[in-house]
Image: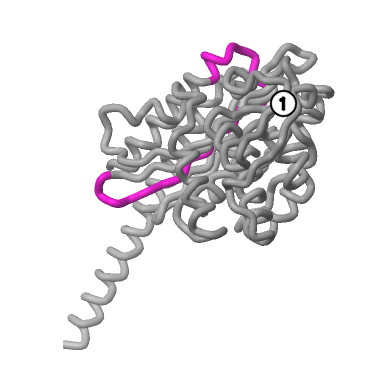
Amino acid sequence: MKYHIRLISVICLIIGVSCNRNSRTSEVSLQDELYEFIDSVPGTVGVAFVSDRDTVTVNNGMHFPMMSVFKMHEALAVANTLERSGISLDTILSINRVDLDLDTWSPMLKEYTAKSFTIPVGRLMEYAVTKSDNNASNLLFRHIVSPTETDAYIRSIATDTTFCISYSESEMKANHALSYCNYTSPLSAALLIKQVMEEPIVGKNYQDSIRQYLSTVTTGQDRLGSVVDGSDVVLFAHKTGSGFRNEAGELMAHNDVGYFRLRDGRSYALAVLIRDFAGTEAEASAIIADISRRVYHYCKK
C-alpha cells in the first residue's frame, strides 16, 4: 500500500512538473516567435505582454523614446494635482493664441480659432490623450504640472519605474534629440496602462475620465487596435506615440501601448515600441499590428 501511495505521488509530481514545463514552454514560444519576427525589422522593437497568467518581454532592457505615450502619464499627474487642490476638470483656463504653436500637431486649433479663448482643463486633457494634441499637452505642463513633477508623481505610483519624463512637446520639437530623454521600457508602459484600467489611482471622476479618453483615442488605428474588429475584444484602450526622424533619417519612435478586455472577462496589456526605424510610418504600424495579432491569437489558445 505504501508503495502504491508513493507511486501515485511520484506520478502526480511528474505531471505537475510536466504542466509547469508546458506553461513555461508556451510562454517562451511566444517570446521566441516575437524575437524571430522582429529579427529582420530595420530598427529596434520592444514588446511587453502582461496578463494574469503570463508576462512576456522582448528587448525590455532597451530605453525607447515615449513621444506622445507620456501624455497618459501626464493626464494622471494632472488629475492628481487637480484632486489635491480641490479643482474639478470643469475648471476654466484662459488661453491666448500667441502662446500656442501653430506649426505642430494640434487638432484643437480647428475648434479654438479666436485670439483668446477659454477651455476647461478636462477638455485639454481629452485633446492631449484622445487626439495626442501637442498644444494641449504643452498647456497642461505650463499651467498645471511640469514634466519633472509628472515624472516624480508617476514614480510614486508605478510598479515599474523604468522611465523618464524630462521634456515637453515644445522642447522636443526645438531639439529632436531630447526625445531620447523621455523614455520608457516596454514593461513599464504596459504595467502602467493595466494599472490605470484596473486599479484606483486618483479620484473616481478623474480616473473615469482618463479611462474614457484612452478608450476613444483617434490616433494610430492601424496599430494595436487592428485586431479589434471582428474579434471578441469588448474594451480596447491605448495611447500612441510617434517620433521625428533622426540624423540618419530613421523614425526615432513609433509606439502603441494598449489594454484589451475580452468577452470572457480576461484582459491583457500590450506595449509595442519601435525606435530608430529605417522605414515608413505605415511599415512601422504594420509591424505593431502583426505583433498585436500574434499576441491576441496566443491569448485565445
Residue in the foreground of this view, choosing between 159 and 82? 82
The amino acid sitting under disc 1 is Ser
Q: The N terminus is located in which quarter?
A: bottom left
Q: Quadrant of residue 273?
A: top right
Whether the magenta-drawn stretch holds residue 266 is answered as yes
Residue in the foreground of this view, choosing between 40 and 280? 280
The residues colored magenta run 263-284
Q: Is residue 86 left or right of residue 3?
A: right
| Residue 279 percent across, percent down from the top left | 61, 12
Q: Quadrant of residue 9?
A: bottom left
Label 1, on which residue? Answer: 116
Residue occupying the point 28% across, 73% down? 10
Q: Is residue 15 left or right of residue 91?
A: left
| Residue 117 percent across, percent down from the top left | 67, 29
Question: In the figure, 257 relative to 8: above or below?
Answer: above
Q: The C terminus is located in which quarter?
A: top left
Whether the magenta-drawn stretch holds residue 18 is answered as no
Residue in the foreground of this view, choosing between 59 and 3? 59
Residue occupying the point 77% across, 39% down? 142
Residue occupying the point 59% across, 21% down? 107
In the rendered image, is residue 272 in sight? no
| Colour convention | one colour
